Image: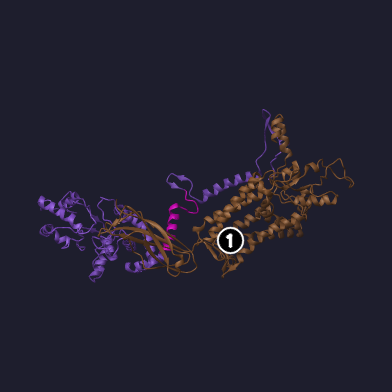
Amino acid sequence: MSENLKSAELNINDIYDEVSDWHVNAGGTKVVAKRMSGRFRRLKWFGMSVWLIFFIGPYLRWNGKQAVLFDIPNRQFHFFDITIFPQDIWMLSLTLLFFAILLAAVTSIAGRVFCGYFCFQTVWTDVFTFIETRIEGDTPQKAMKFKSAPASLSKISRITLKHSLWLAIALLTGLTFAAWFTDVFQLWHDFFTLQASLVAWIVLGMFTVGTYVFAGFMREQVCFWLCPYARLQGVMYDQDTVLPAYDAERGEPRGKLKKGAIDSSKGSCIDCKVCVAVCPTGIDIRKGQQEGCITCGMCIDACDSIMDKTNQPRGLIRYASYKDLHHNAPPAALYKRPRVLIYSFILMVAFSGVGYGFATLSTTEFQVIHNRQPVFVQLSDGSIQNRYTLKMLNKTNENIQVSYTISGLEGATLHGIDESVIIEPGKVSPLQALVRIPDGKLQTELEHLTFTANVISNPDISVHYESIFMGPK
Amino acid sequence: MADNNKNPHECPDTGHEWDGIRELTNPPPRWWTIALYLSGLLVLVYFILYPSLPLVTGNTKGILGWTQIKEYKEDLAKIEEKRAPFEDRIAAMSAEEILEDDELLRYAVGSSKVLYGDNCAACHGVGGYPQPGSGYPILANDDWLYGGTIDKIIETLAKGRQGMMPAHANLLTEEEVDGLVDFVVNSANGEATDAQWKLYNEKGCVACHGADAKGIQQLGSANLADKVWRFSGEPDEIRHTILHGVNDANDPLTRVAVMPAWNEKLAVRLEAEEYGDDPEEYYDGTETERLTENEIKKLAIYVHQLGGGE
């Protein structure tokens, strides 16, 4: 393109011609992709099966409770034995960072692996089209034939079956999603007795409609026009990134096979268009790398099968880097690629951060807030009093008994709170505390003191908080 | 969806052409057109359901009968419903019992923060600490003119307080006033001399401020023997208080210190109960109730925990 712009005189008709040459499918034609078996098909099923965790996960039990539960009303995240509170949410940011960079790293090495094998849009669409092609035929011609056939009991029942299966999957998806946020068995019970909460119904409704529409009707259009990652990942490629690519040098000029004989004046491509027929997004990989390619490798399987049949070596369409295709150079070693190194470094930082977070997950959270309205008062005997709010969060699973002491400020005494307090699991117990210091004992207008929350049953988890004490100038 | 023609070669044009650019007559996609008509329909539906058109006197009501104030009141009712169990318990329990109940105490303090801000903070300041020099009593310390027990605070809130110190400008000589100012300053540090004590007793101050100068809570007289100043500890300000008094109607320069009554009916009832009488006999029908009994109780608890409750 850029070369064209520089050399050729800009002609408006050229632009019109290019526009008409580039067929962009904006949903006008329905892509019915032929299904063929092969290496990448198997890989795709394997990648897709990762989503079984999504469906099975909520049913795992741990100590009589749901093993993984995002308990939003109580602001707790349960992960087997670990309970994570909003105070530890920074770990979530690192986890998100980890996966964002992982996406970038994988994309930089091997293209849109996520899009092709793991993305929910790809996976659900694949399952939905699997059902559809089984019922209505797996080529555009068969699908058209089915569509234009006169209405009959068989046709209607087949269409009904298709939509019922789609809706069943969509419903299960919605319900499963909701199940990560509330007890799954209770949720099933509530849905079937129509007693679920409004939020649960809304979530179910949104996910059911979303799944049904996105995977059933919009399909590749989501990747084309809705998904930001699809567009973003293009800029993460470089010349060493391996992608499903058509080897034009070997393939061109393409031409039909005549009487099964290989014409030596032509390239390897016999223009059978099977690579186009199997493409779930309906693109022609022979036109080069383009935004519609989700790098699922279906065209590789298709082309390989044709190469086998025509007794040519496999690999006319293969995973290859730009350097490989155009300079016959092997891709650079991973450790020599700056992107890979930088991504790996960030991945390691994020991973060790989360690891550190888990290793040092505290069982309590203690905070002391110095009351600023007023910062201090003078009592009748002349002593200075400061008021504090003590907030102790109990992150363990049982009640803890806590007593508070202060240290680090000579003459200061603690008043206004009970000898010890019981804090229930998962609860914060805010307490008002008063600290007094006799008249004349205070050296400067601002002193430091340390509050200690002593957990009586377990002295190991006693915690400190340094605060301030203020007095008159 | 496919009713628009993307290929410019096959698309009819209007015949207009500028520098080789033709104006095509490519219609917008059908879904877009449908969406446009649907949004028009939505407006129509909205006009029918909701108040929409201003008329000369008022406006159309809409068939849903929705109004902002109605929605607000419904929301408020929901909050009241959540609070009801707590409020019921607060009504049933004495303030002292509530102080012992952690959960109710938290509710009382939490829910009276706004009450305090609306009704009390204007004078007593946020956190019970008024502007220095404003002359309003500090609630966050342990000095109480009328007593700092929870019941006394309730009484103060219910019936209001108005102390009284006569102006002494015409009753004392200048030297006597000087002597008394010195006494008050020294007394706060426990350093008053015998001669000053003698003056304090002779001039009748003792009658209200007590033999130990610590004030008498039944009268609301100030404690002169501690470090907390009702008005100010500056000698000139002390002199002003002695000369012009507090709430002395005959002295225009007198200090004004009035705590309004927030629930006279409760005040009357408390008084009746103190004497073991039937409160019905005490009411004269004019008692005001600016705050409800529960609000008084919650505010008393709030004030009690500000730093000096007894």
State the count of labels: 1
Q: Where in the figure is residue B241, as x and y percent of width and height?
A: 18, 52
Q: Looking at this view, is A149 or A47 the one in front?
A: A47
Asked whether residue B274 appears in the rendered view, the answer is yes
> Residue B121 vs residue A234: left or right?
left
Look at the picture and state if A281 lies above or below B187.
Answer: above
Question: Amino acid under label 1?
Answer: Ala
> In which quadrant will I find the N terminus of chain A?
top right
For disc 1, the marked residue is: A178
| Label 1 Cα neighbours within 10 Å, binned few <14 / some 14-19 / many ≥20 | many
Determine the image quadrant of residue A26.
Answer: top right
* Colour that chain B carries in the picture: purple
Determine the image quadrant of residue A353.
Answer: bottom right
Q: Which chain is brown?
A: A
Main secondary structure found in the magenta portion: helix
Asked whether residue B265 appears in the rendered view, the answer is no
The colour scheme applied to this rendered structure is: by chain
> Residue A209 vs residue B133: left or right?
right
Q: Where in the figure is residue A241, as x and y percent of width and height?
A: 69, 46
Q: Looking at this view, is B184 or A345 the one in front?
A: A345
Q: Where in the figure is residue A136, as x and y percent of width and height?
A: 76, 56
- Residue occupying the far bottom of the picture: B276
Q: Where in the figure is residue B87, as x and y percent of width and height?
A: 38, 65
Does A418 appear in magenta? no
> Residue A39 vs residue A471: left or right?
right
Q: Secondary structure at mark 1?
A: helix
- Give the residues drawn in magenta, as a range: B60-83
For mark 1, name the chain.
A
